[in-house]
């Protein structure tokens, strides 16, 4: 392409000018849009993306281990051999061959799905969007773990759902708390549309739902006639054990299951999927057609060709081994540098560590000082719809090297030490980031 | 990938069994989902996709002219040189380099946009979805041409908007009808959220909004403070003339513009875009992040590399020349075979011819007989939200070869002749396809 001609702006707008510029459309947005809050975290992350800052905030997978030459050859062959198919519109449900392969992937976690039950989505984020679109009217209740995935909270907020959190502990969602919460919500005359849960290597809590509890959760939801939405991006990225049996494996009519190739292959193709009971699947396909006509054909056939031509199981093991080293580096650094009055989870897989700060510290208030000290994290409040999480933070070890992880934790411990000293001298620090409405997720928060 | 193990279904379900199977979730879908109608057309199109049927229904571009070897080389280089970027998460707004190139493309139609004003979408279908998501609450009115793009009607229906049609003639949308309709809607106490218009080579009406009317439409919408959503997938695919000046070119703060690479390059990457006033752009980015985190990075960089390495302007001219031959074949066949009591548009670009049937014929009722005679089209009612269009049909000439187009028109003329004979002998034919609620579009209808 010749050099693009970018017109000069008639009225050049600096950042400040933009902020104060009048929005002539301000009174005509939908209610869902008006409820969207400006994200203070987003502004800070713009700073945090500088190379000198160690980001323990982002959820970007580290894909530097992918065999680029081999993938290039596979994609080149795809274009030459099937280019007019790969670059054409395709089915709203997704490529049939890829859907077969997805069933093979899910079989590793005990899911016996038929390709006909699978809907391909633009990443599993779009799966969440379509499920909520199909099920939720404004005011409907969605049950979520406390804390929960920020991107899911963004979706539920955008459909004007009410999120009600359910307590977790180190074995994951607490069954009795679930039962109790359903009762309370119903006693208040509200409709529970579904339970949203991340059973494996939870984002952000970094715990895994025990096998016994999976059965209990399914039983409780069956008794109460509540649909389960099982989000499982990390299930194959365990460090020490074989993959656990998915909740969907024992409740095919009760569970809508979300999967993704973003963490087991690469996120840039945006290929995820939903497995749903037949009638729900049908609605999801219609919703997908309305949203995009069809998910990207090229992405789907690229992932399909990768699965067909490459040792994808070996690649997943290689990813898991790399993430285990990263986790080890983070846990060792936390043990070495963090105060004993802080506590944190010790993940057996996935991308994250969830830290509970020493009493009196506020992770939101501390973030700007951390970024000044060249380290970033996500404050706990991002993972709650109800303002909780002020004393918590999520640290991610997925993307940075072990050296950077150690350095980041060391810097963060320094910031925390200063905070604790200040607190001792002057009392409580300032208030955290406000939480109201909902914010959209971004790739720093996945 | 080794051969996938597809589990046997515990209860094998044939097509009939599925249709009658009880949906245990039937009482918990969102209102928007309950309003979605089953599409009789969809079932017919399943039959129409057989190779012996000439489909004049689908809107698939004919991409057989793309230089596959060269595209394969470009994509292979992309993976080798920038694979870890192309396969990674990226900005919710879209790749900055691609957004610059998009501005160069739009400059061909007089649009002087800045890359910062552009949001990349998963095809322009998703652009429609995001715009409606940002602006429309249930009950809000969207003004559409009569007829209008079926995929847009699907989106507006899914957000529970009320579609009000505005009359067109052979110069496109009628300005006086627009002014009058705005007045009527407002007098009824309803909110008009925007006018949705396809100014160039309209889908399905195949007419183009004249330059004079573009000014009038913009003036009317400015007077009435109505936002214009300009959907322009075909603007560069004119057969005889230079591209016309976009409405957006003269109303940057009044117009949200939708563009797409689906017809000028290839639809399988699903890369479209929206250009919007700054404040609206900001909302669209948030909506995109909630919907997908980010549009597919690989698709974006693939399109970007194609634009950088290939003669994309020459390719568009080559596509236009091919489509002109197809149009000529269709118009010649219509002139030869169709009854003089039918009438049709003579498109100067784009993919479609809009046919008005001889008095008394019903295009919906006739479709099953046409499919039996091995030819398919889209009945006019698909392009109206209000049940109109029974005597019209959309014929597409984009995908089939000129030979197939001639054969399809010949078969269709035969069906129509039989219908007219029957009508003469027995009176009116049966009722057309019912129109209620909204249906999702699919790739047969783009």
Image (cartoon, coloured by chain):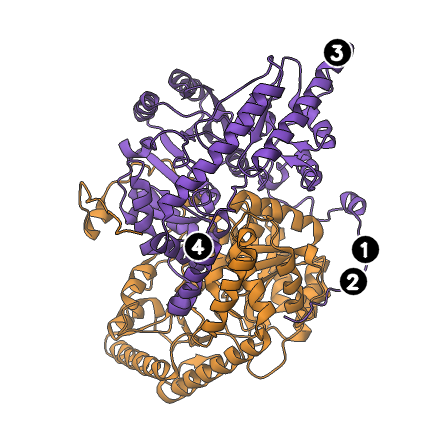
Chain colours: A orange, B purple
Question: Which subunit holds the residue at mark 4?
Answer: B
Instruction: State the CA–CA distance, disc 4 to disc 1.
Output: 37 Å
Q: Which quadrant does the C terminus of chain B fall into?
A: top right
Q: Nearer the viewer, residue B218 or A127?
A: B218
Which circle, 1 or 3, is nearer the viewer? 3
Contact (Cβ within 8 Å) of mark 2 with mark 1? yes
The label shown at residue B8 is 2
Residue matched to label 1? B12
Question: Which subunit holds the residue at mark 1?
Answer: B
Instruction: State the CA–CA distance, disc 2 to disc 1.
Output: 8 Å
The label shown at residue B295 is 4
User: In the image, is B411 to the left or to the right of B294?
Assistant: right
Q: Position of residue B287 (x, y in %)?
A: 42, 49
* Label 1 Cα crowd, 10 Å radius (few <14 / some 14-19 / many 20+): few
Which circle, 2 or 3, is nearer the viewer? 3
Contact (Cβ within 8 Å) of mark 4 with mark 1? no
The mark that comes first in sequence, 4 or 1, is: 1
Instruction: State the CA–CA distance, disc 2 to disc 3.
Output: 52 Å
* Label 2 Cα crowd, 10 Å radius (few <14 / some 14-19 / many 20+): few
The mark that comes first in sequence, 2 or 3, is: 2
Disc 2 is placed on an element classified as loop
Q: Nearer the viewer, residue B216 or B29?
A: B216
The label shown at residue B427 is 3
Question: Which subunit holds the residue at mark 3?
Answer: B
The mark that comes first in sequence, 3 or 4, is: 4
Contact (Cβ within 8 Å) of mark 2 with mark 3? no
The mark that comes first in sequence, 4 or 2, is: 2
Instruction: State the CA–CA distance, disc 3 to disc 4.
Output: 54 Å
Q: Nearer the viewer, residue B264 or A132?
A: B264
Q: Is residue A236 above or below residue A253?
A: below
Q: Position of residue A437 (x, y in %)?
A: 41, 51
The mark that comes first in sequence, 1 or 3, is: 1
């Amino acid at each position: 392409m010749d050099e693009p001609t970018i017109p000069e702006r008639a009225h050049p707008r600096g950042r400040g000018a933009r902020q104060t510029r009048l929005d002539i459309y301000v009174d005509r947005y939908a209610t869902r849009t008006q409820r969207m809050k400006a994200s203070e975290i987003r502004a800070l992350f713009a700073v945090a993306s500088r190379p000198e800052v160690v980001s323990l905030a982002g959820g970007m997978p580290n894909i530097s281990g992918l065999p680029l030459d081999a993938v290039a050859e596979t994609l080149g062959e795809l274009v030459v051999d099937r280019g007019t198919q790969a670059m054409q519109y395709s089915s709203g449900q997704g490529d049939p061959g890829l859907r077969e392969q997805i069933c093979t992937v899910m079989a590793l976690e005990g899911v016996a799905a038929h390709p006909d039950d699978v809907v391909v989505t633009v990443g599993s984020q779009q799966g969440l969007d379509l499920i909520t679109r199909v099920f939720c009217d404004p005011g409907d209740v969605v049950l979520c773990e406390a804390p929960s995935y920020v991107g899911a909270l963004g979706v539920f907020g955008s459909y004007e759902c009410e999120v009600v959190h359910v307590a977790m502990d180190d074995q994951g969602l607490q069954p009795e708390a679930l039962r109790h919460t359903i009762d309370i919500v119903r006693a208040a005359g509200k409709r529970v549309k579904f339970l949203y849960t991340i059973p494996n290597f939870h984002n952000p809590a970094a715990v895994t739902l025990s096998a016994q509890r999976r059965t209990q959760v399914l039983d409780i939801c069956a008794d109460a006639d509540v649909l389960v939405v099982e989000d499982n991006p990390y299930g194959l990225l365990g460090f020490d054990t074989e993959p656990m049996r998915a909740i969907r494996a024992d409740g095919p009519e009760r569970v809508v299951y979300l999967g993704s190739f973003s963490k087991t292959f690469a996120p840039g193709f945006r290929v995820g999927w939903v497995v749903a009971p037949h009638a729900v699947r049908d609605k999801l396909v219609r919703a997908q057609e309305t949203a995009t006509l069809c998910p990207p054909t090229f992405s789907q056939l690229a992932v399909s060709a990768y699965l067909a031509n490459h040792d994808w199981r070996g690649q997943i093991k290689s990813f898991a081994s790399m993430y285990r080293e990263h986790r080890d580096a983070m846990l060792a650094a936390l043990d070495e540098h963090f105060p004993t009055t802080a506590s944190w989870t010790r993940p057996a897989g996935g991308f994250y560590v969830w830290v509970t700060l020493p009493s009196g510290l506020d992770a939101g208030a501390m973030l700007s000082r951390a970024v000044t000290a060249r380290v970033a994290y996500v404050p706990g409040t991002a993972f709650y719809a109800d303002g909780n999480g002020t004393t918590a933070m999520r640290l991610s070890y997925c993307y940075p090297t072990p050296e950077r992880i150690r350095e980041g934790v060391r810097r963060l411990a320094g910031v925390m030490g200063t905070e604790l000293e200040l607190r001792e001298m002057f009392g409580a620090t300032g208030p955290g980031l406000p939480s109201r409405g909902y914010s959209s997720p971004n790739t720093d928060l996945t």
